[in-house]
Amino acid sequence: MSYLFRHLDVVARLSGEHVRLVGVSLMIALAIAVPVAVAITRRPWLARPVFGVFSLVYTIPSLALFALLIPVFGLGFWTAVAGLAAYAQMVLVRNTVAALRGIEPAVLEAAHGMGMSDRQIFWRVQRPLAMPVFIAGVRVATVSLIGIAAIAAWINAGGLGTLVLDGIEHDYPQKALAGALAAVLLAVVADQGLRMLERRLAR
Amino acid sequence: MRFDRVVKAYQPGQQAVDDVSLAVEPGRFVVLLGPSGCGKTTLLKTVNRLVEPTSGSISIDGVDVSATEPVVLRRGIGYVIQQVGLFPHMTVAQNVAVVPSLNGWPLQRQEARVHEMLELVHLPAHEFGARFPRELSGGQQQRVGLARALAADPNILLMDEPFGALDAIERTRLQGELIALQRQLRKTVLFVTHDVDEALRMADAIVVMRTGRVVQYGTPLEIIARPADAFVSELTGAHDLVRLLGLMRVANVPLAHDGEGPDPGAAIGLQADLRAALSAMLAAGTARLAVRADDGAAAGTLTFETMIQAARAATGKAPP
């Protein structure tokens, strides 16, 4: 623990990097996952190929996935972001599709029958009703990305994984432990925060 | 509203709706009646273009519905479905205001309209407006569904088994309220059901459908008294003459004016149906009833014999 308290500034800076890494990855992941999920609910035949690809990506060990991306993006931040975003697709798309499909068909029929356009149905009916399940997906994705992002230190992407790596390399367990604890703390905070949001939306 | 040779085939050779032509007069309450899978719901949905016909056309006030954008068309047609489909994340008031808000009404006008509509379906806005659909009973939910469908004051109301999911007591109550409402509003209503009693009770005219085709189109009395074929007869229970009596009014039967005093205590109103008259006779153990006009004045005497003759005449059978 001594390392953690003596180097709070370093831990804080690396935590910031970690959050940025996860945050940017999540934003990009969402920008892809939500339209894909909407497309799947409108054209069900898309489900099989899309889920096929994403579950394939999901089965690749994270370290291997980063390694595969190095020839494309080189070493560093954006490689990590690409890997993390790809990783999150499975959880996000699956949950978003489940959230949209979970809406009672009668509600959608009524919406059509009232004369809402597809766009109005999406924003006024589907979006609010899908929100709780969608946020649950975001929560699971966020927590797992915080964990996987620690591995991104291997490819020079920074973040709390740096402490773990250095600690192992220099046989300095205190340092590795500080990185691990900080990552756990981040995950717990993100999990609890999103859980609260989820409960608020479900009411 | 007019259907002209409407065909809907979901798969080639399998017509859900098969060459249906019929005209519905404005202000009439028309029931589409038939067993499940007979195409009545499909036919209903061609009116607001939730279903596009394979061929043929539907027109409202002489204008082909396919000439209007579906979204615009639907805002001018009330739509009520069995599962109600209220928006669970919106309050009752917000649900009722959906179409007015789509139409861009100013907020004040929306609010006034919501009040009026909730009053109409006996759910006072101050008590129910701020509630969410899940806090209401099934019957209350469907009242909101009806209020929502009427909110933008459409001329046409499409109702797809609206009371099918309610228990018997609630169903009867809502049927009664809808009849009263219709007397007041005079909408053109297309109402789908497979419940014969509901059809007979509600309809100005009934369209009996079977395997996508119209088998008979007529008033409830015509359908029961002169079913077009064995299918209609069996579906509607036309052999049940008590049902037939339920569709005939005392006012339409020749009354005796012979001055012979009927058994005291047994009287019936001119507007009552003959089923009620029969019931009154059985209850009083008499074959004669004094008939009273709406103002209570004596209007004559109804006898069991004239009742039988009227019923037989309606079915086209010669008097015995």
Image (cartoon, coloured by chain):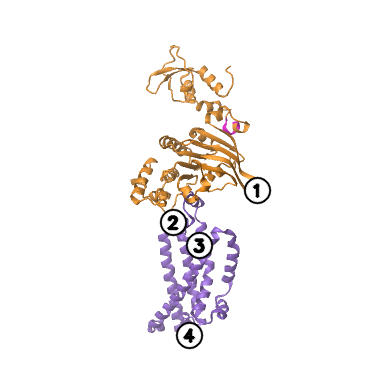
Chain colours: A purple, B orange
Circle 2 sits on which residue? A124
Separation of disc 3 and disc 4 at Cα? 38 Å
The chain letter under disc 1 is B
The residue where tag 3 is placed is A96
How many angstroms separate mark 4 from mark 1 (CA)? 70 Å
Distance from label 3 to label 2 (Cα)?
16 Å
Label 1 CA crowd tier, 10 Å (few <14, some 14–19, many 20+): few
Q: Are marks 1 and 3 on the same chain?
A: no
- Position in image of residue A97 (x %, y %): 52, 61
Please tell me whether mark 3 or mark 2 is closer to you in this view: 2
Q: Nearer the viewer, mark 1 or mark 3?
A: 1
Q: Are marks 3 and 2 in contact (CB under 8 Å)?
A: no
Mark closer to the chain start, 3 or 4: 3
Q: Residue at x 53, y 64 (%)?
A: A36
Please tell me whether mark 1 sits on a helix, a strand or a loop.
loop
Q: Amino acid at mark 1?
A: Pro
Residue designated by label 1: B12
Is the residue under label 1 in contact with that under label 4 (CB below 8 Å)? no
Mark 4 or mark 2: name the one nearer the start of the chain: 2
Helix or strand or loop: what does disc 4 sit on?
A: helix
Q: Is residue A27 above or below residue B312?
A: below
According to the picture, the residue beneath numbered tag 4 turns out to be A166
